[in-house]
Image (tube, rainbow, N blue to C red):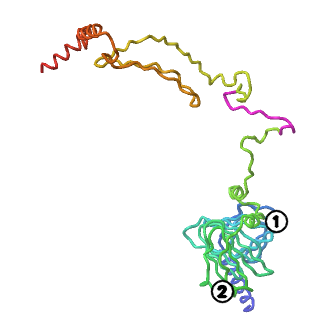
Amino acid sequence: MKTSLTKLKSSLILSLTIVSSFALAKPVAQVVEVNGQVFAVTFDGQTKTLNVNDHVEEKSEIMVGQDGSVTLNDYYDATYHMVEGSHLKFFNKSVQLKKGKTWIQSLNARHPLVLTTANGHVDFWKGEFITTFDQNTTKTQVLVINGDVEVSNILDKNMKYTVAAGTFSVIDPETENGHPRPPTKVGLSSLHDAIAEFKSIPEKMRRETEAPTRSIASVTENASPSKKGHIIFMSNGSLKNRVPASATGGAHTYFKQKTVHEKHSTTVALIHFYGMRQNIVADVAPRSPASVKTSKMIILPKKIGSELNIDSDFSESLRIEKAAQPNHSKELDSLIQDLKSY
């Protein structure tokens, strides 16, 4: 009788322990996308195939089979992408990468989250990064796409580096005493290789990482290729009938302007000289070359009088007649007299 009571008591204790264990287990993530074979091993050792909308409990391990991939969301605004051969264990506010590669996208800016490997420790908040752990070489690599993370050795968290976007760090037990290597800038081809395995990466990231192909701006995609040896004439908009400037047929008629030249008739204007005597100018023969002997010019004498042996009666009459002639016109004489009166 006593033995039966002891066995009953042990069975009750075991049952209560199992029930309490199930009661303590809480979901920490949910499956949002799954492809191929993906398995979950719960903390009590049960294995099941994951499907979309399945909940992942704490301490559960997710393993991705051949040609498989899975995407999970935790309850702290973080998304975890896993590819073929990856093995990830979920805890509350932390995950442990045991094998393979995972890409984490976090929108969380309030709660610190953690990713660990066998020798690496990564603290992250808001950002995106890809972590790879190789079981054969026990190397951990952290490549940051957006934001920044803090990387250190799991046994020495004081020695850590802040890895910014566009750089990566490696934790190798064989070099630098297992401490993370200083961040190194990553190339575009290396980034392409890092994300090539992920089938569920966002379309925006795929467009940003793909190099755009350059084409000729004036040629459309659907334009049929021209035949070899043919000349293609391209119009320039509204001037459809425009021809080259060197062509005949009035190519520049739209630039020509007709001008009319008016003929003006000329009239002879009389010139009057006042207040001076007109000198007699001798006729000068046309200028000859310097090598030709110049001809003698006849200049009329300026003196009039007895030196020229002119008749005295004629000279006297000429003097009287000259005195009788007014020196100025009536208008000019009147102006002179007015000026003298002032």
Q: Which residue is mark 1?
A: 37
Q: Quadrant of residue 23?
A: bottom right
Q: Check disc 2 and report its element: helix, strand or loop.
A: loop
- Specify the amino acid type for callout 2: Leu
Magenta stretch: includes residue 228 = yes
Q: Residue at x 68, y 27 (%)?
A: 239
Question: Are the residues flagged by discs 2 and 1 in contact, CB closer than 8 Å?
Answer: no
Q: Is residue 166 visible from the viewing direction of this image?
A: yes
Q: Quadrant of the N terminus?
A: bottom right
Q: Is residue 189 left or right of residue 74?
A: right
Lower sequence index among marks 2 and 1: 1
Q: Callout 2: few (<14), some (14-19), or many (20+) C-alpha neighbours within 10 Å?
A: few
Label placed on residue 155? 2
Q: Callout 1: few (<14), some (14-19), or many (20+) C-alpha neighbours within 10 Å?
A: some
Give the image location of residue 35, x and y in percent: 79, 61
Give the image location of residue 29, x and y in percent: 67, 67
Residue at the bottom extreme of this rendering: 2
Give the image location of residue 136, x and y in percent: 81, 81
Q: Is residue 22 visible from the viewing direction of this image?
A: no
Q: Is residue 77 left or right of residue 203?
A: left
- Specify the amino acid type for callout 1: Gln
In the figure, 247 relative to 71: above or below? above
Give the image location of residue 224, x and y in percent: 82, 38
Depth check: 328 or 7 in front?
A: 328
Q: Residue at x 62, y 73 (%)?
A: 149
Q: From which residue to which does the magenta span run?
A: 225-239
Q: Check disc 1 and report its element: helix, strand or loop.
A: loop
